[in-house]
Amino acid sequence: MKKTLLSFVLLFALVNVRGQNTIITKESYSVEELKNDFKILRASLEEAHPGIYRYNSKTKMDSVFNSTEASITKPMGEREFKILISKVVNQIGCGHTKVVAPKPDQDKLDEGHTAIPFQPYYSDGKLYVLRNFSTLTDSDFLGANILSINGHSTSDILNKMFSIFPSDGNNMTHKYRNLAAPRNLTRYFYYLYGYNESYEVVYTSQNDSISKKVTLPGLLFDDLISIREKKYASTYLATPVEFKLFDDKKTAYLQIGTFDEKSLRKSKINFQKFLKTTFKTIESNHIQNIILDLRFNGGGTDELGKLLFSYFIDREFDYYASLTMNKNKYEFFKYTSRPDASAPKGMLKANQNGTFDNIQSPNAGKQKSSLPTFKGKIYVLINGGCFSTTCEALSMLHSYTNSVFIGEESGGGYYGNTSGPTPDMTLPNTKIRIEIPLMKYVMAVKEYSYQDRGLIPNHEVIPSISDKILGVDRELEFAKKLIDQ
């Protein structure tokens, strides 16, 4: 998730409003209705999405749009059409651009007994049970290898989900880690296979090769969350940030689980003061090493990611090379709940490229370093759960420090993303919703080997399902060994 401050938030609030609650979807839509919706989708993306040609050329995207429209030759239901346009949208390579089911359909899903009663963990092409919310015993089901659900093989499920779940460029780890969320798994299973309130699961237990079949009733999402909070409370941090000094007196551990200012305030954390106190403590204790844990930090407020980076550089710096929008007012806003919305006065300035620069962002222009600057060794723990604002900070650390990265490829694009204010438009016929981000972020980073990927770690360390269940932190252990060596 990506958020910005001041007037940026105001624009976001104006347009990021869900579609009408009174809309009614049909079982099937005519070719004319589908093509009309598709043309509106294409026109909206071409008008508004500033990163539409970031990873694929206009020629390639035109070909994708044209061939897809030509393939609409028969009536379709909403789910079939959603899958079709999701595959098109995914060609943009933007993890912030999402295709969402009509609100009545999603409400029915969220409010019914539909939640798949386990949290999966993806590893080596397989799906394992990381957390068990069902009535099966943990000794039998925890760590189980899921072979099929409702007759669909795991490989078929995953391949189809990966084709419609968005990510930046050709990054896959974002899909691996975010599809594992119970709500995402259930929603995307619905998109592919329809509404279900029970699930026939074929699996093998962790230490057994004999397959078993069981029918598990779906849960209310509220009940699933309640079970998770009671059963797995010890696996959650009491606060979204943690700082401690290790016994060796030379290493500090700094974990930041979010840059979302709202979540931090809810936990009564003043992030600016927290960082200042943390780095003063590091300085006063003559700490030589920092283990910076950003795993599963999905992003948040732009300025907070920059603030973290500013403690690792001892000079002024550019954070963004550019921060642009295509327009200050859009035709496609007529398909949102605020057709008259526009950028706040003074936020945008026309540039020579025919687009607009955001001149009010606190991250625009030269940025100052923060004191006390840390000049020791930096070990950064990352995985596919790192996204958006977090990946911006990671790219800067990679470009301008000697940080060592441990874990798996980060979940966001190295050179930036498209996010910021994100209107939620509703297609007039099918009522499918599309979240279109309006701000293109280009990081002021050095040249990188992988144009369409996240940050590749120096040391790939991916925990097994046994590690995850037993609470063995392989990445942290690896970082400690590097320091000891």
Image (tube, grey):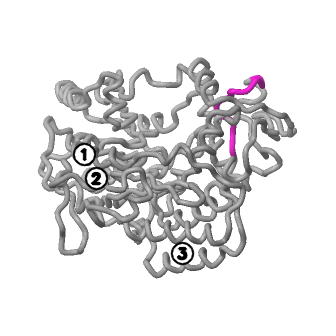
Secondary element under disc 1, as helix, strand or loop, is helix
Going by the numbered disc 2, the residue's amino acid type is: Met
Instruction: Compute the Cα span from label 3 to label 2.
Output: 35 Å
Q: Earlier in the sequence, mark 1 or mark 2?
A: 1
Q: Is residue 63 magenta?
A: no
Question: What is the spatial separation of the Cα atoms under label 1 and label 2, in whole angstroms?
Answer: 9 Å
**Residue 174: mark in rendering:** none
Which mark is on residue 306? 1
Q: Amino acid at mark 3?
A: Phe
- In the image, 53 versus 40, the foreground residue is 40
| Circles 3 and 2: CB atoms closer than 8 Å | no
Which is more foreground, mark 1 or mark 2? 1
Residue nearest the observer in this picture, 6 or 310:
6
- Foreground residue, 384 or 271? 271
Q: Where does residue 82 sit, x and y in percent of width and height? A: 62, 59
SS state under label 3:
helix
Q: CA distance from mark 3 to mark 1?
A: 37 Å
Residue 80 at x, y percent in the picture: 68, 60
Question: What x and y, as percent, mark residue 357?
Answer: 21, 62
The residue sitting at the top extreme is 230
- For the image shown, how many numbered marks are present on the structure? 3
Residue 231 rendering spot, x and y as whole percentages: 61, 19
Asked if the residue at tag 2 contacts the one at tag 1, i.e. Cβ–Cβ closer than 8 Å, the answer is yes
Residue occupied by mark 3: 65
Can you say whether 243 is above or below 110 in the image? above
Where, by quadrant of the figure, is residue 132 drawn?
top right
Q: Please state which amino acid type lies under the numbered disc 1.
A: Lys
Residue position for label 2: 396
Q: Is residue 7 above or below residue 156?
A: above
Q: Which quadrant would the C terminus be assigned to in this image?
A: top left
Magenta segment, which residues?
127-137
Residue 68 visible? The answer is: yes
